[in-house]
Image (cartoon, grey):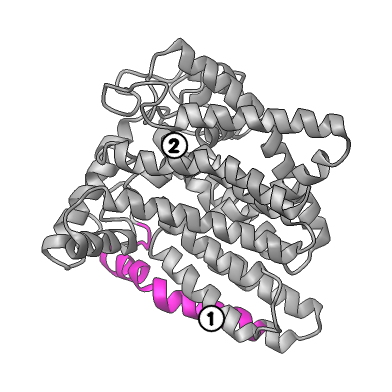
Amino acid sequence: MSPARARLAFGLVAAPALLMRFHNAFAYPAGWGFDASHNWRYIHALTRSWQLPTADAAWSTADPPLFFYLSALLLRCAGLEPVLIPLLNTLLGLGVVALAMRLVRRAAPADPERALLAGALLLYLPAHVHMSAMVNEEMLAAFCTSVAMFSVAAPREGGSRSIRRALWAGAASGAAMLSKASGALAAVAGAGALAWSGWRAGSKRAALRSGAILLASAALLGGWFYARNQLAHGSPLPSRLPAHARMLGMPPGERGVLDYLRFPLATFTDPQLLHPALLRSVWGSTYATAWFDAHRYFLPTDSAPVRRLGTLLLTLALLPSAAFCVGLARGATRRSATDAPLVLLTLLTLLAYAAYSWRNPWFAVLKGTALLGLSLPYAYYASEVLTRWLRRSRLAAFGIGAALAVLALCVLLSGTFGLAFERSELPGLRWEEVRPT
């Protein structure tokens, strides 16, 4: 396919995704997102006073403050219009898409079609779509993490200096830390990758210096909030605070080792997190929420058509998910300067997510949206493998292309708020009477 035809095809694919995202920014109720009502209270409090509250002051005040201060500043400067914050998240999400495409373009300059596919994969990732519309810090954290990873992983142009790259990555990692605690993983992954790459190249002193600069700049920018929590509450990440007491009653209430090994059929047949089998499946719940509205914040709770759509979407999503896993494994064996930070970030993120779900054994914390910091690794590796599969034969191209097209249609139907399904009741699953079996 010629470059002009490839760009035209991408435009045709991207246009519906862009319309969906901007439609959601205006149409999705501002108070319906994950923790959105609590986040709004925090933001509106900051529009009246810039004073940073204590972690135990309210539900959202234990979270890092960058998203809330940026949102309050936006509202004060541009008027108290709620739609401004979903629009900000939408633009941040598109920034992540642009970074993914730029990273692939730098790594594979002779394969522009792969870069376009990388962008399309993120444009139609449901977790990415959902968080672009919600008043929540996830998209800001994903954007900052992606900037940090791009700074470290992108092949150098014009011999850019490692110190400058380390400073950029450290500043972005620090901003990610001030958006969400998992931002610290970007600093660790970036520093580790810089040190490892320099070590392999025989520049041990330069490698250690670059890694130290990245960690120091991230800590200076983002570490103060966690030091403040340590002094005030005895922990950098205070949990089970009085403001969060309601969460303590959520099912299942405990986790076992088998919860990390189960991947039940209900993941596909009845993708909603209060299903008894999904309550006991960490990765099944995570997969269902990454690729579908398994928390029911967009779609009706009890609907046979929604279940059927979820079954089709989650089955088709096995294709890009498998491509990502294959690409990640290949990247781990290549151990190049581009692969090192992406692979390391993925492994650290999955381990941290597993540990967090063990420490907080409630269904509500299992969200594929919490893994959006992996947007660049996902787009990079899934596009690499899918491009190779698409070029095997005409039959493979037709089959894979058709599957991806139907997947995109399913995402449009499930992710465009109010298009195919109307949700009239309050968002979320009713969990109060649920008891694990």
On screen, residue 5 above or below 281 = below
Task: First in sequence, mark 2 or 1: give its number.
Answer: 1
- Nearest the camera: 192 or 252? 192
Residue at the (39%, 14%) spot, across then down: 302
As for residue 234 lying within the magenta part, the answer is yes
Residue 213 image offset from top left, x and y in percent: 55, 83
Residue 218 image offset from top left, x and y in percent: 47, 74
According to the picture, the residue beneath numbered tag 2 turns out to be 361
Would residue 357 be seen by someone viewing this image from the given angle?
no
Q: Is residue 422 left or right of residue 287?
A: left
Residue at disc 1, secondary structure: helix
Would residue 83 be seen by someone viewing this image from the given angle?
yes
According to the picture, the residue beneath numbered tag 1 turns out to be 167
The image quadrant of residue 134 is top left
As for residue 80 lying within the magenta part, the answer is no
Residue at disc 2, secondary structure: loop
Three-letter code, disc 1: Leu
- Nearest the camera: 132 or 293? 132
Three-letter code, disc 2: Pro
The image quadrant of residue 72 is bottom left
* Magenta residue span: 208-237
Q: Is residue 364 left or right of residue 210?
A: left
